[in-house]
Amino acid sequence: MLNSTIQIKIKQRLNKLDSQDYDNIECWQVVEAFNKAQVEWARRQLHGINLVKEGDEQSTRRKDDLQILLKNLDLIIYPEDIYYKATLPENYLQWKRVDAYAKQDCCDKRRMTVYFAEEGNLSLLLRDKLKQPSFEWGETFATLIDGEVHVYTNEQFQLESASLTYYRQPIKIQIQDCVDPYTGIQSTQNVECEFKDDIIEVIIDEAVAIIAGDIESGNQFSRGTEAAERNN
């Protein structure tokens, strides 16, 4: 869907029929509201705080809608004392899984099953014989801290490689020649929304609700919120 169409649809749902009450909304306000709505929609679908309470990959629709945000990245890993660390990508939104290959001096490399664990339980996990890293069983765990992913080895093996599968942030739309008041930078090109048109329609309703809340338009706020949730 073209950015010009998104602008028309947002203004259409803010204005009363045959009126031009809110045609003075600037392009940067449309861009800011739409980009905010994209992130809110994605977080709600991933966490399952939508109308049908479905999280990521819990239904065919969720798999289909969110697959565009799934990304796989080969990590550049650095050894530390009892773990290997790698920096999370800048567009990181939510964890999906880590794949890793490990080796020992006596054995060929093998694929490890990596569980996502809580940093607060680190000491317990390293002490528990059933949960601590094990090359023999091909299992270990990873945590997130300070913008990094830590894959633990407990000095039992070495990691040869690792990759991260994650949900990334949606690409922000841009409207050519629109000046962002927060940065003072003028957009030099159009960047269109990456989602399918049916999802964009839902995000438009969310953006309308955001703008309506900013201008204290109760009817449009209620309609936009309800329409966005009803069509999830």
Image (tube, rainbow, N blue to C red):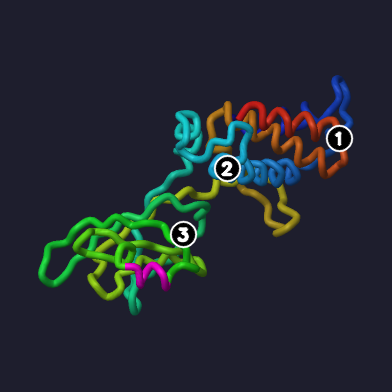
| Residue at disc 2, secondary structure | helix
67 to 198, vertically: above or below: below
Residue for badge 3: 89
* Sooner in the amino-acid sequence: mark 3 or mark 1: 3
* Sooner in the amino-acid sequence: mark 1 or mark 2: 2
Contact? badges 1 and 2 (CB < 8 Å): no
Q: What's the residue type where badge 3 is placed? A: Pro
Does 161 sit left or right of 204 as displayed? left
Tell which tag, 3 or 2, sits nearer the viewer: 2
User: Residue 118 at x, y = what percent?
Assistant: 47, 63
Q: What's the residue type where badge 2 is placed? A: Ala
Q: Nearer the viewer, residue 172 or 42?
A: 42
Neighbours of disc 1 within 10 Å: few (<14), some (14-19), many (20+): few
Q: Nearer the viewer, residue 166 or 190?
A: 166
Give the extent of the magenta segment.
Answer: 123-128
Q: Disc 1 versus disc 2: distance between alpha carbons?
A: 24 Å
Q: Label the magenta part by its dominant secondary structure.
A: helix
Neighbours of disc 2 within 10 Å: few (<14), some (14-19), many (20+): many
Q: Residue furthest top?
A: 18
Residue for badge 1: 218
Q: Disc 3 versus disc 2: distance between alpha carbons?
A: 18 Å
The part of the image, by quadrant, that contains residue 20 is top right
- The quarter of the picture where the C terminus appears is top right
The part of the image, by quadrant, that contains residue 104 is bottom left
- The quarter of the picture where the N terminus appears is top right
Q: Disc 3 versus disc 1: distance between alpha carbons?
A: 39 Å
| Residue at disc 1, secondary structure | helix
Q: Residue furthest left?
A: 106
Q: What's the residue type where badge 1 is placed? A: Gly
Q: Which mark is residue 42?
A: 2
Contact? badges 3 and 1 (CB < 8 Å): no
